[in-house]
Image: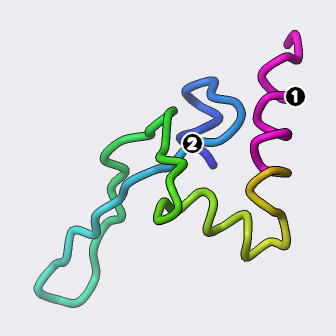
Amino acid sequence: MKAHQALGCRGVTRADFCFDHRPDGSGDLICLEVNTQPGMTETSLVPELAEHAGRSFGELVKWIVEDASLDR
């Protein structure tokens, strides 16, 4: 969320991360990219997450369109 907000993103994004392991077992979580156009196919993560949250694909698309039309 911090990367999404810091970049001024809105709507749906997908962030990719990696974990930089250290020999002592610690490490840093590194944000590699914030994708502002994540996939929307049957096997994509965004529709899968929406379904997990109880939203249909149609409801997800409606929300994306309505959110995009807001003047912020």
- Residue sitting farthest toward the left: 23
Return the residue at label 2: 13
Identify which residue is drawn at 63% across, 49% down.
1
Q: State the image quarter where residue 67 is shown.
A: top right
Q: Is residue 68 above or below residue 22?
A: above
Instruction: Tell me the kind of residue under disc 2.
Output: Thr
Q: Position of residue 63 (x, y in %)?
A: 84, 40
Q: Which residues are magenta?
A: 60-72
Q: Nearer the viewer, mark 2 or mark 1?
A: 1
- Residue sitting farthest toward the top: 71
Q: Quadrant of the C terminus?
A: top right
Q: Is 29 or 25 nearer to us in this picture?
A: 29
Relative to residue 53, is residue 23 drawn left or right?
left
Few, some or many residues within 10 Å of mark 1 (<14, 14–19, 20+)? few
Identify which residue is drawn at 83% across, 64% down.
55
Q: Is residue 25 above or below residue 30?
A: below
Q: Is residue 23 above or below residue 5?
A: below
Q: Position of residue 41 (x, y in %)?
A: 50, 53
Q: Position of residue 49 (x, y in %)?
A: 65, 67
Count of all numbered marks drawn on residues in the image: 2
Sequence-wise, the earlier of marks 2 and 1 is 2
Q: State the image quarter where residue 8 is shown.
A: top right
Instruction: Tell me the kind of residue under disc 1.
Output: Glu
Which element is circle 1 on?
A: helix
Identify which residue is drawn at 53% across, 41% down.
3
Return the residue at label 1: 66
The secondary structure that most of the magenta stretch takes on is helix
Which element is circle 2 on?
A: loop
Q: Is 45 or 15 nearer to us in this picture?
A: 45
In three-dimensional space, the C-alpha distance between marks 2 and 1, rounded to whole angstroms, equals 16 Å
